[in-house]
Image (cartoon, grey):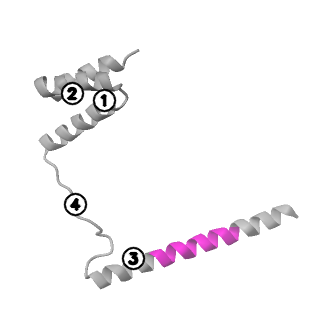
Amino acid sequence: MPRRRRATGTRNIRRALASIAQSLSELVQRLAQERGGAASRVGRKLTLSPERRRALKLQGQYMTAVRALKPQKKAQVKAVRESQGFPAALALARRLQAP
């Protein structure tokens, strides 16, 4: 008997979730119509040049490496970044992270 109850409960949950998903879809379409735009287009598409993409990737790697450092080592890495640039600072941060 418990199987039947569990199956019925699961079925009811799935129906409820499908109903919520349908309602949200309709709401998105209505809001898009009121705004006068397409429903699938929410924000602007970000176009990056290959150079900018590389710079952002390097910055992300730098931030990840520096985040785990103690304040004294962070200051050391920042000084290297100012004088020699991101690649040298990233290399130093990675060396300082190693146990």
Q: Do the numbered discs 1 and 2 sit on residues whose CB atoms are within 8 Å?
A: yes
* Residue 45's disc number: 4
Of circles 4 and 2, the one toward us is 2
Out of 78 and 59, give the one closest to the viewer: 78
Please state the horizontal and vertical placement of residue 39, each as a whole percent of the image.
33, 75
**Label 1 residue SS:** helix
Q: CA distance from mark 1 to mark 4?
A: 30 Å
Q: Residue furthest right?
A: 1
Marks 3/4: CA–CA distance: 19 Å
Whichever of callouts 3 and 4 sits on the residue coming sooner in the sequence is 3
**According to the image, label 1 marks what residue?**
66
**Residues at discs 2 and 3 in contact (Cβ within 8 Å):** no
Tell me, for residue 28, which label it has, or none.
3
**Mark 3 near mark 1, Cβ–Cβ under 8 Å?**
no
- Reading the image, the residue beneath label 2 is 78
User: Circle 3 sits in a helix, a strand or a loop, which is it?
Assistant: helix
- Residue at the image position 34 percent from the left and 32 percent from the top: 67
Under mark 3, the amino acid is: Val
Q: Position of residue 78 (x, y in %)?
A: 21, 27
Give the crowd class for mark 4: few <14, some 14-19, many >=20 residues within 10 Å.
few
Q: Amino acid at mark 2?
A: Lys
The relative height of residue 48 versus residue 32 in the rendered view (above or below) is above
CA distance separating discs 2 and 3: 46 Å
